[in-house]
Amino acid sequence: MNADDAKAVMERLAQMDEPAAQTRLAWLVPELNRHNRLYHELNAPEIDDRAYDLLYRELQELEDRFPHLRAADSPTRRVGGKPVEGLEAHEHRVPMLSLGNAFSAEEMRDFDARIRRFLGDAAPEQVIYYVDPKLDGLAMSLNYEDGVLVSAATRGDGRTGEDVTHNVATIETVPLRVTPPEGPVPTRLSVRGEVIFDLPGFEAMNADRAASGQKPFENPRNAAAGTIRQLDPKVAAGRPLVFYAHSHGELEGVELPERHSELIALIDTWGFRNAGGTLCVGIEAVIEAIADLGERRSSLDHEIDGAVVKVDDFGLQEVLGFRTRDPRWAIAYKYPPAQVSTVLDDVIFQVGRTGAVTPVACLRPVRVGGVTVSRATLHNADELDRLDLRMGDTVRVERSGDVIPKVVTVVMDDGHAARPLVVYPEHCPECGATLVRDPTEAATVCPNSLSCPAQLRGSLKHFGSRRAMDVDGLGEKLVNQLVDNKLVGKAADLYRLKVAQVAGLDRMATKSAQNVIDALEVTKDRPFERVLFALGIRHVGESTARDLAAAFGTLDALMAASVEDLVAVQGIGPVVAESVHGFFQEPRNRDHIQELRDLGVKFTPPAPPAADAGSQALAGKSFVLTGTFPTLAREDAKARIQAAGGKVSGSVSAKTDFLVAGDKAGSKLTKAQSLGVAVIDEARLLEMLS
Ligand code: IVH
């Protein structure tokens, strides 16, 4: 926009009174939204950027003057408002489902056969299926009332997700208002779909980050999930997220079409983007469509990890209904992870916080599944032997979902035998200590746990990480500087830092230094289990730390525990027990813990178990367990029910109160259904337990 244009606009606006502004806004908002859609969705802009900017500027000015006239679907809402304080729970009025998986044509035929068997005489000659890409993104429910976006929530456990409206509203492809070109506006609507980064957007964003010294994101899925959970919507507003619709939850005020394909076509006219689907008559056509999509997969603009196959007819869907967790009428076909060939240029050896030295392949950059990969893990010495890896070899690299890329095989070409073998160094690349091969495990370890800077950096990063002490502001760069400048030699030293010392480091100033010191102060009250996890004891992950804290209550009791005492704790095996015991026997570790205590870290014991009434929530109820559960082992589920006063028995009878059914639930489920026993899933059980 040039200065004259802007001036003219401003003058005109300055003279507008409220009724005139209202009339103008009633035209401007839908007009700008229309141009947004023409530009972003249909790739067919009617006006140039300058004309658009002029209209947008006009909108901003009017909204500044009359803030109460700002519409719910005003495009200015895309820029993101104030940060929220935390993410609130959002209960889905219609649950968000998961899908069963299939990995072969055979399993697809079984799926079709199951459907026909279930439908019996009602089965059509050929079932019509809708096949669309399974987008590897973050599942999202967009909720509209009278056509206006009122909330957006993640899937969570399917019943309750997190409210992320502040971020989702910034996504251009999320309509803020549903405007059917014909027919009524739905009174209630939830559109389900995935929030993703398109690959071109993802790569451009990473290039920008690299250029400004920020760490590029590993992969689009994690980047999308991380962005959507941010509290400050400005972050999401600045990143090119996209929403693709693939199904619906609620729909009221508009007649539901007869078929899924018709629903997708309808919501397409309402402004929702979708990834396109194919209608297939019969399962053989589905198998062909899946193969065809698989071939096009690497040339798509977005990452897909499979194809979703749905019975198209809503009437049949209703008859088919659900198994415990998944609909009978849909399935996800999963493609094998993408693989490509590239050349191994170098191998570097990274030293982790436990001293384990891990080889990492430096690869000639190559695109796998749409992402450029230049590093891949090689795990350990055994893996190098298995691969017979040589410098300069051509290797096959695989990337599956959010897993770090790995080298799967070496291409045994003519030159392979003559190339130099990749071997472990004899000395630690960081501190020069002679490496040791741990005979019980595959790991090669730097034994210099006292002063190897790499181990120190790793353990400090772990100590400050979100799930451990959660020290705000203690990122990788700061840790590296603290170690390099010898300001910190162990975790306790963090609590001795002075503002002036931290402020003197690169990219730090008095204010940011003070923030870090304040953040450290807060962590002195972290509960015992978190501090225990933060100490980085071998084999003690988050859940083991929780179990130990619950079993021993105080740090002193845990430190005094014998190996036998430790093994007696449910879930603690001999290896973990030895490791924990050994850690606390080591004078150096005891001294370190004493230092932490002297500096004010409290190791706050866990709250005592809830009073009887609370812990006996399932008193008098009888349960039967069947199938495998998503998170709980069968034994754990049983123990927790019993601890809450419930009974667990092996077979279903009329006296059974609840059947807890997991995956592959068999005859017990059928029996429970025939006896009218309540069937619940793991999520519901956990709710009852809490
Ligand atoms: S349909 C019951 N279609 O995959 C059917 N889901 O494994 C409801 N997903 O959480 C979903 N692409 O978020 C459907 N084209 C697609 C999909 C898709 C990705 C996600 C979905 C769901 C998960 C199930």
Image: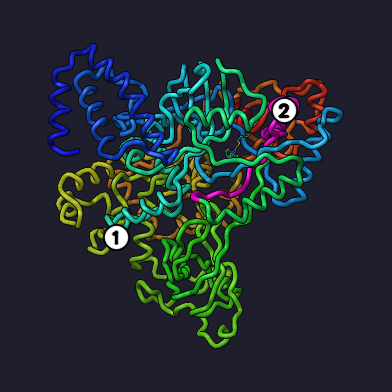
Which quadrant of the picture is home to ligand 1?
top right
- The residue to which callout 2 is attached is 321
- In the rendered structure, does residue 321 fall within the stretch colored magenta? yes
- In the rendered structure, does residue 221 fall within the stretch colored magenta? no
Determine whether the residue tagged by mark 2 lies in a helix, strand or loop: loop
Q: CA distance from mark 2 to mark 1?
A: 55 Å
Q: Horizontally, is 93 left or right of 3 in the view?
A: right
Specify start and end residues of the magenta stretch as a single range. Answer: 301-329
Q: Residue at x 20, y 48 (%)?
A: 513
Q: Give the mark nearest the N terminus, 2 or 1.
A: 2
Q: Where residue 369 sits in the image (x, y, percent)?
A: 53, 57
Choose between 422 and 269: the one closer to the eye.
269
What number of labels is visible?
2
Tell me if residue 647 can be seen: no
Q: Where residue 295 sits in the image (x, y, percent)?
A: 61, 56
- The residue to which callout 1 is attached is 480
Choose between 600 and 659: the one closer to the eye.
659
Q: Residue at x 62, y 21 (%)?
A: 256
Q: Where residue 664 sits in the image (x, y, percent)?
A: 74, 40
Q: Is residue 88 above or below residue 221?
A: above
